[in-house]
Amino acid sequence: MLQMSWLIPLFPLLSFILLLLFRKSKSESTAWIGVLLTGISLVMSIGVFLAVWQGEGIKTEGTWFQMGERAITMGFEVNPLNALMLVIVSLVSFLVHLYSKGYMHGDDRFPVFFAYLGLFSFAMLGLVLSPNLLQLYMFWELVGLGSFLLIGFYYFKPEAKAAAKKAFVMTRIGDVGLFIGMVLLFWQVGSFEYDEIFASVKNGDLSSGMLTLTALCIFVGAVGKSGQLPLHTWLPDAMEGPTPVSALIHAATMVAAGVYLVAAMYPLFQASEAALTVVAVVGGLTAIFAASIGLMQKDIKRVLAYSTVSQLGYMMLALGASGYVAGIFHLTTHAFFKALLFLAAGSVIHAVHTQNIEEMGGLWKKLRITGPLFLIGALAISGVPLLSGFFSKDEILASTYADGKYGLFWLAVIAAFMTAFYMFRLFFIVFTGEARGETEKGVHESPGVMTFPMIVLGVLAVVAGYLNTTWFGTFLSDYLAQGAVELPHGDHHGPAWIPLVATLAAALGIALAYLIYQRGTLSRDWITRSLPSLSDVIYNKWYIDEGYDQTVVKGTRGLSKLGVLFDRYIVDGLVTAVTTGVQRLGRVGSRVQNGQVQSYGTAAIFGIVILLLIVALTGGYFS
Amino acid sequence: MNAWLLSILIFSPLLGVLVLMFVPSSDEKSIKWLGVLGTLFPLGIALVVLSAFKMGGDELQLTEKFSWISYEVFQSKGQVSYPIFYEIGVNGLSMVLILLTAVVSVLAAIASFSIKQNWKSYFILFFLLEMGMLGVFAAQNLFLFFIFFEITLIPMFFLIGRWGYLEREKAAYSFLIYNGVGSAILLIVFVALFMKTGTMNFQELAYTFSLPQAELNQLFITKGFKMGMLIALLVAFAVKLPVFPLHSWMVRVHVQAPPAIVMIHSGILLKIGAYGVIVFGAGMFPDQFKSLAFVIGLFGVINLLYGAFLALTQTDVKRVLAYSSVSHMGIVLIGLAAGNTSGMTGAVFQVVSHGLISALLFFLIGALYERSGSSELSAFGGVAKRMPILAGVFLAGGLASLGLPGMSGFISEFMAFLGLFEKMPVLAAVGTLGLILTAVYVLRAVLSITFGAEKEMPESRDLSSSERVPAFVLLAAILFIGIYPAWLNDMLRPTLDAILLGLGG
C-alpha cells in the first residue's frame, strides 16, 4: 500500500487534465470525474493512514537532476504527520467536490471549477508527501496557484481580481522568506532533505544564530500561507472565491499548510528557543487580534475568515509553546468544524443569495439540516465541552500554561471568549429572530449532494476530539510519537482548572451573544456606543489594509514612478546628450574644413609640434 | 555528411532566400508559407545535428576547420604568416542555443503572418538574421564570431525600421548606435587579443590565457591587460544583454519592433550577450572574472530590481515586458557572478528559459494587437471571456515569467539565487525582493488584460489553430524544462564543468 502512495496526488491531477479537456462541456455530470478521482485518493489515503497507524512508513527518492556532485532529489515520504494530513486533505477535498456539484449548479464554467479544484488537491497532496524542502516549496507555490485561480474564479468581478492578486502577492512575500530559509539551510547542511537537516541540527552543525535565522525565515513562509500577523490581510479578501473553495483552501487545508510546515520542520524550531518564542507570540497575537475583528464583521464569510485566522493563530501558539501534539490536534479538529461552518454558510448563501448577515434571520425553521449543523460547528469552535474543539483548544491552553507563557495563555483565553461570542452572534442573527430583507421568499434547504458532506463533517466535528483525550486515550499523541519529532518531555497537561476556565470563557461568550442578539437584553450597539473609537478601529480591521496602502503600496508605486522619470530624463537623457554632443562636434569639424590652405598648414604644424613633444618627453617609447 | 553538417545548418536559411527570389513579391500567401518552410528546414537540420551530437562529450563536436584568409607580416622575427581559419563547432552550450534559435525562428515565422506589407524583403532579411544567429553560436574563432555578430545587426536594423510601429525609425537608429558602439569595442578587443596571442581560436585563446603568468610575461600579457580586456568585453556585451544603464535602446526596440521580431530579439539576440559573457568572459579570463564577481552580481541585482520597479507602473504591456526582460537578464548576471555550479547552471537555464517565455509572451501580445490594435493595458479587460485559450496561455506565460515551480522560470531563478546565496548572501537576500516585485507586475499586467469587466475589442476570436501551434509548442517547452530539467542540464554539463574548472569550482 505505502509504495503506491505517490499515486494519491496524481488522481486529482488527472482530474484537472481531463476536466480541462472537457472544458466546454455543458453537462454537469463532469463533476463526477472530480468526485470519483478524489474519492480514489481518499480511499488510498485512508489505507496509507491505517498502515502508518500500524507503525509502517516509507521514503523513496530519485535524482531529479544532478548539480555538480550534488543530486537534487524528488520523491515521497509517508510518516505519521503527513499520513494524517493526507486523510484530512483528501477527505475535505472529496467532500467539497461533492458539495460543489450542488453549489456550482448552473455556472457557465462548471467543469473549469472542478478542474481547478483538482489542481489544488494535487498540489496540496503533493506538498504533504514531499520528503524535502525544495519539493515542498514547489508544491507550496502550486497550492498558491490553485488558491489564486479559485479566488479569481469569478474573474469578471473586480473584487475577485483584486483579491486573487492580493492573495498571490501577500503569500509570495512569505514564500520569499521560506525560499531564503531553505537556501541558507542548503548551504549549511548540503541538502534539502528533512532527515539530513534534522541530523545536522542534532549534531550541532549549525550555529545557534543560524538556527534561529533559518527557522525564522521558514516561519515567515508559514506566516504568509497561514494568514498570520502581519501578512493576514489576503485571507479575508480571499472570500471572494466561491464558498466551497473557502471551505477547502481557506479553512481546512492550504492555510493550515503553514502550521504543517512548522510541524514538519519542528526539530529545527525546537533547537532555537528564540524561534519558538516568536512562533508563539505571533500565533497568540494573531489569535486575539483576528478574533477581535471577527466580532463586528457583517459578511458571514468574513466572520468565518477572521475566525480561521484566529484559529490558525491558536495552532501556531501551540507549536510555539512546545505543544506539538496540541497544534496538530487543533489543525485536525479545526479542519472539520471550520469546513463544516463554511459549507453551512455556503448553504445559507445558496438559499438567501446574500452574504450580509443583516439581511438574514429566522432561517432555523427553513433550513432544517443546515441550521443544526451550523450550530454543531459553532459549538465545536467555541470550545463547548464534549465537542471536538473543546479538547483541542484545551490542550493548546494547557501547553501554553505548562510552557510558562502565562501572558499568551490569558490572551488565548480572552480570544476563546471572543470566539464563542462572534460565532453565536452569527448564529443568533442568521438563524433566530425574524426574517429580514426581501430574500426570505422561496428559501429552501440545499440538495442532498450539499447536505451529505455537511453531515459527514458534522459527525467528525463532534467526535474528532476523542482522538486525544485523557479520558479515553491519547491516541493521537501515541500515533504522532512514532514520527521523526521527539515530542517534548514532561506532562503538558496543566492544572485541572484550565478546562474550567476555557469552558467558562466559552459560556460567557455564548451568554453575552444570547443576551444581545437573542433576548435583546442589551442593545446591539451597546459596545459601539460605550467605546466608539475602539469599535471604529476594530470595525475597520485595525486599519491594517489602509496602513499598507499608505506605506508599502504607495511607496513602491512612488519609487517606480521615480524610476520611470529617472529612466526617461537621466538614463535616456544622457544618451541624447552624448549623441547631440557628437553631432555638435561633427558640425565644428565640418566648419574646420573651410578650404583655406593657411589654416590647414597651421593645423599640420601644430600636429607635428605635438608629436615631437611626445617623442621628446617619452624618450621615443612610441617609435 | 557529418563533416559538413554544421555548415549546412548555418547556411540553410539561405535556401529560403534563394527560393523566395523566384516568387513574385505580391504573392502574399506563398511568401508567408515559404517563410515558415524556410525556417522549418534549418530546424530539421538542427535536429539532425542534435542527433549527431554526443551528450556528455566535453570537447567540441562536429568541428570544421578550413584555412580561409592568410596574410604575411614582416616583423623583427622575420616574415610571419597569420592564417585566419573558418572554424566552427558545437559544445553543449552552443548546441542548446542553436536549437533555441531554430525553434524560435520557426515560431516567429508563423507569428510573421501578421506582417502587412513587403513580405518578400521581410522574409529575406528574416532568413539572413537567422543565419547570423546560427553562425554566432557555432563560430569558434573571434573573426567568424564577429562577422556573424555583425550579420545579425543589419537585417535587424531594417526589420525594426521598416516593419515596426510608429517610432520605428528612431528605435532602429537607437539599436544601431548602441550595438555599433558595442561592436566597435568588441572589434578593438578582438584585434588586441589577436595581436598579443597570434590566434583567434577560442580554445587556443583560453589555453594561452591560462598559462602561468611567467610565460604570459614573455608574450607581454600582463594582468592589467587581461583585466582591461575583460572589462571591455563585459561592456560590449552589457550593451547586448542589456545591463543598466545601457538598456534604453532595448526597451525602444521591444516597443517598436513587430512582435515576431521581438520574439527573436528578446528570445535569442539578447542571449548573445549572455553567451559572450560566458564564453569570452568567464571562459577566457576566469581569474579576473572572479575578482569582478561582486560588481557583476551588484549589476545583476540592480538590473533585477530596476527592471522590476520600472515594470510596475508601465501602461503599455510591451513596455512592461521590456523592463521585465531587463529584470530577467539581471538573473543571468546573478548566476554568473556566483560562479559556482548552481549559479552557472541557473544563468544558462535563464538564458534558455527567458528565450522561450519572452517569445511566448510577445507572440501573444502580437495576437492581441492584431485583434485590438493596441497594446495599452487600459485597452483590455476581461479577455478571458471571449478568448479563454489566449487568456489561459497568457496567464501561464506570466506565471512562468514570475517563476512558478513546474515551469522553466522557476528552475533558472532558483539555481541562480541558490548560487549567489553561497557566495554573497546579503546581496542575494536584497535580490529576492525582485521575486516579489516580479509577481506584482506580472499579475498586474496579465490580470488587467484577462480579468475584470469585458472591454469592447474590434475583434475577439480566440487563438486560431495556426496561432495555437507556437503558443502550445512554447508552453510545452517551458513546462518540459520546468518538470524535467535533467535533459537540459545534461546537455550543458560538460561545457559548464569546463568553465567552472577555470573558475575553480
Image: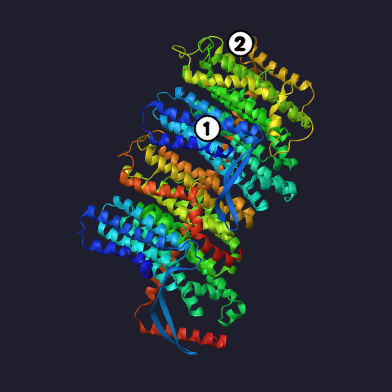
In this picture, is B1 found above or below B71? Answer: above
Quarter of the rendering containing residue A553: top right
Quarter of the rendering containing residue B396: top left
**What's the mark number on residue A41?**
1
Residue B273, horizontal then vertical, whole percent: 47, 62
Specify which label sits upstream in the sequence, 1 or 2.
1
Residue B195, horizontal then vertical, whole percent: 48, 79
Judge the density around disc 1: few (<14), some (14-19), many (≥20) Cα neighbours within 10 Å.
many
In the picture, measured across the screen, residue A272 lies left or right of residue A441, that is: right
In the picture, measured across the screen, residue A509 lies left or right of residue B284, that is: right
For label 1, the SS is: helix
Determine the chain carrying the residue at label 1: A
For the residue pair B410 and A484, the one nearer the viewer reads as: A484
Residue B444, horizontal then vertical, whole percent: 47, 41
| Residue drawn at x 44%, y 12% as measured from the top left | A442
Q: Are marks 1 and 2 in contact (CB under 8 Å)?
A: no
Residue A443 can be seen, yes or no? yes
Residue type at mark 1 is Ser
Residue type at mark 2 is Gln
Q: Nearer the viewer, mark 1 or mark 2?
A: 1
In the picture, measured across the screen, residue A125 lies left or right of residue B43, that is: right
| Residue drawn at x 41%, y 38% as measured from the top left | B450
For label 2, the SS is: helix
Q: Are marks 1 and 2 on the same chain?
A: yes
In this picture, is A114 found above or below B142? Answer: above
Residue B171, horizontal then vertical, whole percent: 38, 58
Q: Which residue is label 2 attached to?
A: A518
Q: Which quarter of the rendering shows the N terminus of chain A?
A: top right
For the residue pair B196 and B485, the one nearer the viewer reads as: B485
Residue A415 can be seen, yes or no? no
